[in-house]
Amino acid sequence: MMDQAIQTKIDQWLSGNYDEATKAEIRDLQARGEQDALADAFYRDLEFGTGGLRGIMGAGSNRMNRYTLGMATQGLCNYLKQNFPGQQISVAIAHDSRNNSDKFARVTADIFSANDIKVYLFEALRPTPELSFAIRYLGCQSGVVITASHNPKEYNGYKAYWNDGGQVTAPHDKNIIAEVNKITSIDEVKFEPKPENIQLIGAEVDEAYMREVLGLSISQEAIKRQHDLRIVYTPIHGTGITLVPEILKRYGFTNVHVVAEQAEPNGNFPTVVYPNPEEKDAMNLAMQQAEELDADLVLATDPDSDRVGIAVKNLKGEFVLLNGNQTGALLINYLLQAWQKAGKLTGKEFVVKTIVTTDLIKKIADSYNVTMYETLTGFKYIAEVIRELEGKETYIAGGEESYGYLAGDFVRDKDAISSCALIAEMAAVAKDKGQSLFEMMVEMYTRYGFYKEELVSITKKGMRGAEEIQQMMADMRSNPPQTIAGSKVVEVRDYKSGTRKNLLTGEESKLDLESSNVLQYITEDGSKISARPSGTEPKIKFYVSVNEPLASKADYDATAQKLNEKIQQTLTDLKLK
């Protein structure tokens, strides 16, 4: 028996001013007796999470479609008019390679234009970081990118940005939702476009953006000497193909090989299950090509090109994937070294990372007398710190473990385009010193400590899954472990209540971040375990970080083994394996 509130919502869609294809889809689910699918499509309204709107495409209030997208856009229009009264408001809009992304971008543009808001619409697919750049470059008050990042092909999404080029944060995110919730009918959404308010953009913004990315380069001399560094690149059927090969060429790299099978933008992502460089399978074709070519570096970007995954040769000459913590620490270490060498460190510089990203970054920053700020998970919070410190302190770089990095502040979101360029430059610098990028990483570990991280994601789909995830978090709060992997738990950080508790002294203190459903256990030996339900996917994520000193390159394998054993014991103790 269908829940009455859900049935009422279904009836509203069937009798309301929705198009016939949408109604037919709902009737088809009813005819086939797909009660669970119907319930999941209507049990709630899609809402802004850490990445804006994101959901499976299809009919329903909990699905990504022209109506849920339309109500979000109308709410954003109303909110913009309240915030910028009497001004000519403008927005920039971009989209990725997903199915329906171009249609959703056009619907979004139409609604903005109908509300007398000036629209700069990218003429074709573009990377998310370029949208962030375009907002600032064109002096817009807001922006939208249609993407579901690295989610499976059934998903699409809608990320809203503010006038600083960062994704919307508090109070704007909640206020936009409040405006959306005031819209009780899709009849209040202005779907009829005013074409004179829509301007197509493309090449000019591309050039302006790439000029800024070129300006990040620090080691042009090393690139000149190592211009033929062998690089394999895959855009995994996404937007990276529009700019990554070109920016590598402009940096001076002359030996770049694009994975042909994944070069064409395609929303079905035919060669992968998940178009996510965090997934080993998504990197297989690039790794095969790298082995055939005996490449120095593999680069892979996700569909909207805000994340980058890399592979390099290990100490045995085998290609291995680096995780986001390793790449982020390497990149920040490289940039701080270069800034110091150039005499640019004044004591007013800073880097940023999220609370679930490796603490190795803090050790590196401390050694250069560079401040490190920590934020909640989500790059929008890193962008918020950059905005708050603008004109007071100098941002160098930031990153999060989920393969997102940003150098320079002309973009306010994670940027795989500039990151690809700088990672390639870093590999050229390493080769110029007779090192691989992996050896550069081992050298970093010998100086600062060998940090090893692992992420475990548990998927719990649908309405029941959300309840199970809530119960898991409640259980961990009420019954924290006393020891993990043989080390005493000495501190619990609960970002939901905003408290840090020292279990040895009983002392409690405040965490200086807004509330978020994240729990962390810190052990006596410096391990850190974080539990966090995803804001954009039906998952709960566990982040395990362990560390040991590394005496020398010769000790790498033995220390790595020791850390792996500690991680496995941690997962066993927390019943995650």
Image (spheres, rainbow, N blue to C red):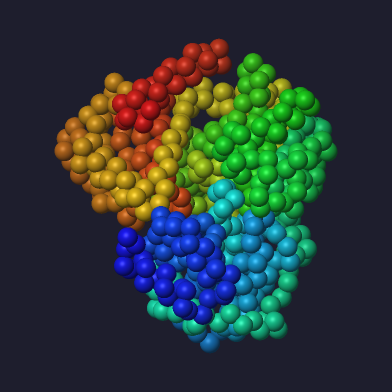
Q: Which of the two residues, 103 or 305, is positioned nearer the viewer here? A: 103
Q: Which of the two residues, 203 or 211, is positioned nearer the viewer here? A: 203
Q: Is residue 445 left or right of residue 422?
A: left
The spot of residue 339 in percent (x, y) is 61, 42
| Residue 63 appears in the rendering | no
| Residue 449 appears in the rendering | yes
- At horizontal 54% and vertical 34% (from top left) the residue drawn is 323
The quadrant in which residue 218 appears is top right
Q: Is residue 264 left or right of residue 69?
A: right
| Vertical placement of residue 515 versus 459, above or below | below
The spot of residue 340 in percent (x, y) is 59, 39
Work out which quarter of the rendered image holds the N terminus and state it.
bottom left
- At horizontal 53% and vertical 87% (from top left) the residue drawn is 86
The spot of residue 353 in percent (x, y) is 47, 45
- At horizontal 41% and vertical 39% (from top left) the residue drawn is 458
Residue ranking furthest to the front:
31
| Vertical placement of residue 164 versus 401, above or below | below
Q: Which of the two residues, 391 or 416, is positioned nearer the viewer here? A: 416
Q: Which of the two residues, 47 or 171, is positioned nearer the viewer here? A: 47
- At horizontal 70% and vertical 66% (from top left) the residue drawn is 122
The quadrant in which residue 508 appears is top left
Total marks shown come to 0
